[in-house]
Amino acid sequence: MPEEPTASIGARPSRVGRWVSFLIGVLLARVCAGAATSPAPIDFNRDVRPILSENCFACHGPDKDKRKAGLRLDSREEIVRKLESGHAAVVPGKPDESQVLKALALPDDDDGHMPPRKTGKRVTPQQEAALRRWIEEGARWAGHWSYTSPVRPQPPTGPRTTGARNDIDRFVFQELGRHGLGPNPEADRTALIRRLSLDLTGLPPLPEDVDLFVADPRPQAYEKLVDRIMESPHFGERLALAWLDQARYADTSGYHFDGFRQMHLWRDWVIQAFNRNQPFDQFTIEQLAGDLLPNPTVDQKIATGFHRNVMTTDEGGVDPAEYMAKYCVDRVSTTAQVWLGTTLGCAECHDHKFDPLTTREFYQFYAFFHNVPERGLDGTRVRNPGPVLRVPSTDQGARLLLSLDSVATAEKRLTEAEAALPRAQEAWEKSRQASLAEAPRLEGLALRFPLGTNTQSEPAQAASFSSASNAPSGFHEFVPGLGNGALRLRGAESNVIHAANVPDLDATNAFSFGAWIRPEALSGAILSQMEEGPGYRGFDLLLTDGKVEAHWIHKFPESALKVSTKDRVPVASWHHVLATYDGSRKPAGVKIFIDGESRAFDVPYDSLKDTITNAAPLLIGGRIHALQFSGAISDARFYRRALAPAEVSALFSAQAGLMARVPEKQRSDEARAWMKTFFREHEAPDFIAARDRLKTARREKEELLGQIPDTMVMEEMEKPRDTHILVRGNYQNLGEKVTQAIPACWPPLPAGEPTNRLALARWLVSTNNPLTARVTVNRYWAMVFGAGLVKTSNDFGSQGERPSHPELLDWLACEFMDPQTGGRDAFGKPMAHPWDVKHVLRLILTSATYRQSSTVGRQALEKDPYNRLISRGPRFRLEAELIRDVALSASGLLNERIGGPSVKPYQPPGIWDGTDHQYEQSHGPDLYRRGLYVFWKRAAHYPSFQTFDAPSRETCTLFRPRTSTPLQSLVLMNDPVYVEASRALAARALREAGPAASDRVRRAFRLVLARLPQPKELELLESTYRQQRERFTQEPKSAEALLSVGESARAPGLDPVDLAAMTTVANVLLNLNETITK
Amino acid sequence: MLALSSLLGGGSLGAAAPSSTSGIAAQLRHAPQAKRVIYLFMSGGPSHIDLFDPKPKLASLTNTELPGSVRMGQRITGMTSGQKQLLCVGSPFEFKKHGRSGIEFSELLPNIAGVADELCLIRSMFTEPINHDPAVTFFATGNQQPGRPVMGSWITYGLGSENSNLPGFVVLLSGGGGQPLQARYWGNGFLPGNYQGAQFRGAGDPVLYLTNPKGIDSRARRQLIDSMRELNQMQLGAVGDPEIATHIENYELAYRMQSSVPELMDISTESKSTLELYGAEPGKASFANNCLLARRLAERGVRFIQLCHRDWDHHGNLPSEIRRQAKNTDQASAALIRDLRQRGLLDDTLVIWGGEFGRTTYSQGEIKKDSFGRDHHPRCFSLFMAGGGVRPGITYGATDDFGYNITENKVHVHDLHATLLHLLGVDHEKLTYRFEGRDYRLTDVSGEVVRGVLARPG
């Protein structure tokens, strides 16, 4: 059906296919003429308020700051009040004395002419006449219709309502009759089941289901079908679609960097809530204030994600207070639009210009949402900003419990093992004393420097400290070390100990060297025999930032080997470090040991090719003029072979043996601590095993926690924030302090209860709220018929459009809150429950109004061009997501899984380029999930949905426009998902139908459109099939190319030429207007 | 339904269509100076102090605290609000007068300076937000909060397009790094989706999904569209919904776009001297290529062409960063103006060059010998326009010795919008759209046409 243009001063003429537009012109002229001669009495809300609202309220309405001449025209009391001049704007019964009419009558250029010329507004002669009649008839006033609670009207009866199936029809038919129209005949069953399936599940019916319904002889076949489809688990998905727009659901934060967030648990909740037909009042309360219910369930907390869907910022440099205010403002605007159909957001900066809502009232409403413990600036960019709720699945929950249990057990075991350590150490020390407590005598020891005052049983060989030259005493200090003495160096060049060059040593020789060290700085050389730069020929062992490094250098860096451990040696504790080298010049021939254990290392240089022989002295605690060591060194050794790991380990462990001989009391604190650590790390297998078990258990727990999704939820701060009016909406300009309250134009909150979000939520769905039920049923009406009974579904205020069928709207609203029709149970009570969404939908869908054929004749197009009178069945384009769903479903590719995280289907490259995120496309079944689950990035939309008018979801969207553009044609023809769906649909038709081309075409046609093709349609498609088949026969490569689009596997056993030709036929089908239209 | 006439212009809807293609009613319009707009958006906030607005006295004030009398307690961003000092820093770049007009530019923009006599340089722009997201949104839509249409959407809504084979509002992106670009910056807000900027791309399909799938050539596509047309026509006959006629027409237009768009995007057909003028290289994605494409789009009657170029957000290491960025943009920006002039297009094409705000006179972070940074500054910034009815060869407005506050002829973003619409022949107070019970405008509730920049102030 043609889309109705939005009324606006600057509005473009509508495009209804130009050949129709002149008909509408004719029609509009007739309607206007009809209105002028209508004998019906003036209805204030219908005939007068819109004129006053449009032309007068901006300067003479609710906004006190903009009010001119102290004159208000938005209440009866004010409009008839005598002014200082002695006149009154309106004198009931006396139009000629009423200033309003006088001001209208003044010439345009007169200063007193109203509305002033510069506003660009103009009151038409017909409107002026209406005002005059209204004053003549006594200027009867009525409150704005939507602020008065609906009262259930009596459905009309009489000849015009003939053919009505339920009360909806009586209202609709009555109105049709008044316009000289009657309803269309009922659509055929095939059309009805397709319409119902699309309306209730968003998916086309299976041909088999169509056949069953067409052949169903039962009198209530249609009603049973409605009930059956409503029970589909896809019902919740279909209903959720519009709710996600209203809740501005997205997978990213929206502002600036638009970081990722995770809210799919909330989306799942919405789907399930619709599927279990949760009453709309509960649906409301749980989403707005589930956290404040007594003992809320996890689901009720998840539901509160509704208002955490607001955009949040991650832009460095913003003032958090500014954004906190934005989040709150959004919550106010969204709540008011979704439940109250009111543009309360207008009052953020100034009193509302058209509706009786003040800025003060705006911030009183704002105060309900001002207590969430959130931060204005969310710096995470990858995670959900708090408050969040972690929600394990049943399986994850069970595994988590087990995991927590094993962590606790492991902790207990470790404590026990630790408690047993001292006694075990004592016993172990005794056993060591008994055994040979000597350092192992290892072959090849060439040099040894004890560097302690104590002499060892093992003789020092070759050079000794006494051979060091130029060592002024006083810079060295002998310290006890671990019991056998050590030399402490202070990082001065003069501290470095010079020994004689180790002769006959080259890169082809194997050797090992190391020492005990207790570093006091992170860097310094331990042992070196190396020339000065730039060549640095020689070898060394050193610490760099705690890492143990060793060089074997011919000329640095061209011919050099360097290794550097990944582990670091901590300062201020004793450690054994030693390098072994096998003479291969390769890193594989090197091992670096720390505390007897070989450690992994990096190899920054691996280019050693030549000799390392030099004449430099062997230095302890430095290199020549460089890298002087700070700390203690003891027992430096040099072996002329590569020690085996077990030997190095023994060398290290020998220290413990030596120490075991020293009575515990005589050990220094440091030695005692070292011994304790040594024992734990090397001689206490029970303790080590217990510790490893705990580590593993904790790691497993963390991994599990990482897999458990979280979701953003509402919470209240313990200490509530103060709320001030933000003057002119400026977060830095705090005005009067306010507390939570409902605007005065609506019924107040019940007295004596805490005024919090829960009270607000309950108030929204209380039966004396005049708006929520009307606004909600109006949206379901719009979902089914394409436009609401109030077309401006987001504005029920004075600027909004009047309902096309006011009584029907009120009847539906009353039926929603307090159902009286439909079946009754054994006790005579209505089967439907209050706020029963399925009940209201069932009423609409079982009406004769809905069941009309959508064929439109010339007369109906003239009198009811946009089908606002419902003179025919609904016919309009599907939502973006559903267009894709239909193609996937008809082709059999659809993955019907309900709920879960969002997916990333095919998308052309570069869509996310401006955003600094990478699009990681999904694969496998995730490619074929319903559009509802496609990842919603606010800064860069999924392009094919955007082309079909899906909103950005930055803010609440109550109505999607329906455009029709060539960019949409390109999507349907060329987006890989539609090409792939064409292939799958073709394969399905080939498999499921007989070999005749006509059968195959017929099958594909029915899968997409439910109905059978007309003979002419069939003929055309068959000829397309033959034409393309011929082409592919000549170009088999083209056939293969077309069939290669998409990641799903090609159905086996089908002739590629047949399949390709059928694929093009399927592509034609998926591009038809009928396919994307319900 | 408000679709296609604005997206693809009118007059293409078949013989019976009325000849009027314009968007808004004729009485809202006056004679336009400009028929189309090329908006070069420099994302991040180029430093006015280092490019357009010479501050010789600032050099001697380098390393001195910004006087409180200048800042006047105005808010600054969270990135510098924690700094102990706000030390002024002069521009290290030399400024010189150029052309007969004698407009001063820094040495970083030699080519733009070379077309000085074509330019109208506004040194007194100011805006309200202080951070990127709200500031770009504000500049684009007249409001800091997302949800409203951008300039290009308003203008195509108001004026439609002049080309039936191309969208009326086209967007081209370039540059990497720096601040992210949001689809909202070319979004239709509450206007119907056909008014959103259509992004044309240098790589892949120039328009999304333009290319037929492998195995379908142009001839096959024609055959398939013919089948669709016949089937749709049968349906139209059976159901009578005029929407079906539109659907049929869309496929014809889509088919035409499949040849017209690649032809448009193929810059290899340009002469060598033209490519050299811009520094454009066929097959490469760059700002230079986009400038050349902008001219080609302008030639074909596209109403609003928006280029977004990233990475002008120089919080640190400004001297070398801005030099690099100026080099990326200077030549092609000037080339566009020269090229439009020599093809006779500049008179009715309005070119706008600028960012979302300026940069601070004080340094963000330490001032080193060759390096310093500047934070966001909304109180003043520079922007230039050319062609389309603006007065050439002038500077408009001035700032104080610090380049901090405006001293004469303030131009608010809404004023710029009002002026832009005026040049297109539209009264900014009358171009409205009713949404949620209110008539919205690009200029919200304010905006004055800046008469001083008009060639014919009338």
Image (spheres, coloured by chain):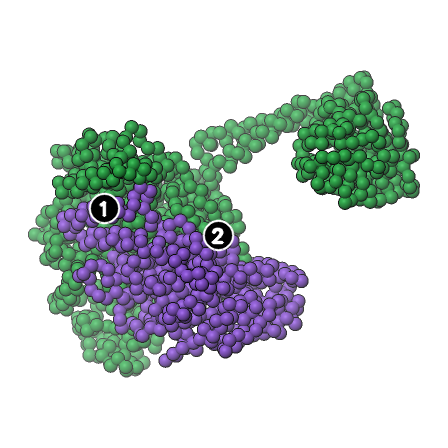
| Disc 2: host chain | A
Residue at left offset 86%, top offset 33%: A451
**Residue A1071 position (above or below residue B95):** above
Q: Position of residue A1008 (x, y in %)?
A: 23, 40
**Residue A919 position (above or below residue A990):** below
**Dot 2: few (<14), some (14–19), or many (≥20) neighbours within 10 Å?**
many
Q: Position of residue A1060 (x, y in %)?
A: 27, 37
Residue at left offset 54%, top offset 57%: A317
Q: Position of residue A272 (x, y in %)?
A: 34, 39
Determine the CA span between mark 1 and mark 2.
Answer: 45 Å
Secondary structure type for disc 2 = loop
Shown colour of chain B: purple
The extreme front residue here reads: B272
Q: Amino acid at mark 2?
A: Phe
Secondary structure type for disc 1 = helix
Q: Nearer the viewer, residue A243 or B25?
A: B25
Residue A447, disc: none
Q: Position of residue A195 (x, y in %)?
A: 21, 43
Q: Which chain is green?
A: A
**Dot 1: few (<14), some (14–19), or many (≥20) neighbours within 10 Å?**
some
Residue matched to label 1: B223
Residue matched to label 2: A257
Residue at left offset 76%, top offset 20%: A427
| Disc 1: host chain | B
